[in-house]
Amino acid sequence: MKRQIIEQLNMQDITPEDIGDDQPLFVEGLGLDSIDALELIVLLQQHYKIKLSNADDGPKVFRSVRTMAEYIMAHQAQNA
Amino acid sequence: MDRGLPLGCPTGVTETQTALTTVSMQFYIRSSGNISPQNTFGQVPFLAEAVVSGPGKFSCLEPDYRQYIDAKMIRRMSRIIKMGVAAAQECLKAAGLQMPDAIITGTAYGCLEDTGLFLTKMVEQQEELLTPTAFIQSTHNTVGAQIALMLQCHNYNNTFVHRGFSFESALLDAAMLLGERPASQILVGGLDEITGYSHELLSRLGLYKGAGSRGSAGLFSGQSSGTIGGEGACFFVVTGSRREGDWASVDAMTTFYKPDSMQTTCRYVDSFLDSQGLAPADIDLVITGRNGDFRGDEIYRHLLKDVLGNPCHIPYKHLCGEYPTSTAFAIWLAARILQSGSVPAAAGTGPAKTIRRVLVYNHYHNIHHSLFMLTAC
């Protein structure tokens, strides 16, 4: 997933190892912004067929790589 | 209303219903930042050596953008945005200017790479799941907006998209602003990129010479159709208030659209010189937009011989290729020649005397014609 984020956001000079599992993605940490949030929503749809229906869930889901992974796994378990 | 223009602006030259309108003004080129297929960016000698292209297209020599653009911003920028922003930054730095009074850009194609990316994804993904970045960055005014964002500049900001008159319109807008406030310092530039898609499409329309051509080195040899595709991002700081060290003065400019005959073109050029009270003998050098396509080059040949009396002349598209805003490169070349007083060997052969006055004449597909008169400061 870290590799997918790097590719989707064209993050040059950053490797998957540079991104901590619990590192905040927005503002501090990776410093992502609102446009990146849209890119991450597209990433979830493209790669995991997950449509984020409730915008209020965004800050919680995209807090870190770990929270994204947990959201994806929960969604997949729900639809298994 | 008297707006206090430096030399009275605009001055109409009325002859017939389709008469030429020459904008007579005087403003000064203070600095430039130029990313082109030549070594023109940064503190480099003036065209010390000509860079030649292979057949196909003439791509820009690009700097390390990380020196000019924040890493967090650079990841979203396509090539033309990086070229434009870096050229603008270099231009402002050379002028010692932190905040321009206006930012004006001219571009025909805009951010073509992002447009192509966005449209391709629309097709491939059945108009669903489109990423926002390419869409947001694909608009023509992205470069002007990015420069303003980086500078936190809330001053006048405009982008002109008029095919072969895009840069001319931007420069005219700058001239009019300077007419109102001569002490202003305006950032104005012309930029266009050539991408794989655009080159392929324009090649199909017969605009470019084939794969068997000799590239820029053989652009003017033989009588063949087509030219070589080019690109560039060239910015200037211009002002109505002259200062020591300014590169050159732009005294007049005009454009005319789809002249109905060679005679009309000749008459317009003649009229342009008349409006400045100049005879052909007063011009030290003519820079023409010859591009190696015999159909369009015939106009330059005719004009140089029959109207201008075979003056000393050089082309410029063997240095940058053909693109709709190439006159920005031509103005850069003219200003640098006036600054140095002579023509570098890479550009061609100039007169033996010091060059004080340069006429730039270009036409884009015999549709968009433009004339500029520049003098040394």
Image (tube, coloured by chain):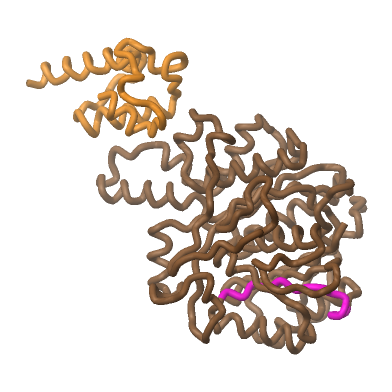
Rendering colour (chain B):
brown
* Image quadrant in which you'd find residue B321: bottom right
Residue B290 inside the magenta-drawn segment: yes
**Along the line of sight, which residue is nearer the eye, A31 or B4?**
A31
Q: Which residues are magenta?
A: B279-291
Q: Residue B255's x, y, as percent?
A: 71, 69
**B146 left or right of B274?**
left
**Along the line of sight, which residue is nearer the eye, B296 or B108?**
B296
**Residue drawn at (48%, 77%), measured in percent from left and top?**
B226
**Residue drawn at (63%, 71%), measured in percent from left and top?**
B368
Reply above or below: B224 against B129. below
**Along the line of sight, which residue is nearer the eye, B112 or B32?**
B32
Q: Residue A48's x, y, as percent?
A: 19, 28
**Residue drawn at (77%, 77%), measured in percent from left and top?**
B19
Q: Residue B318's x, y, as percent?
A: 58, 69
Reply above or below: B162 against B310. above
Rendering colour (chain A):
orange
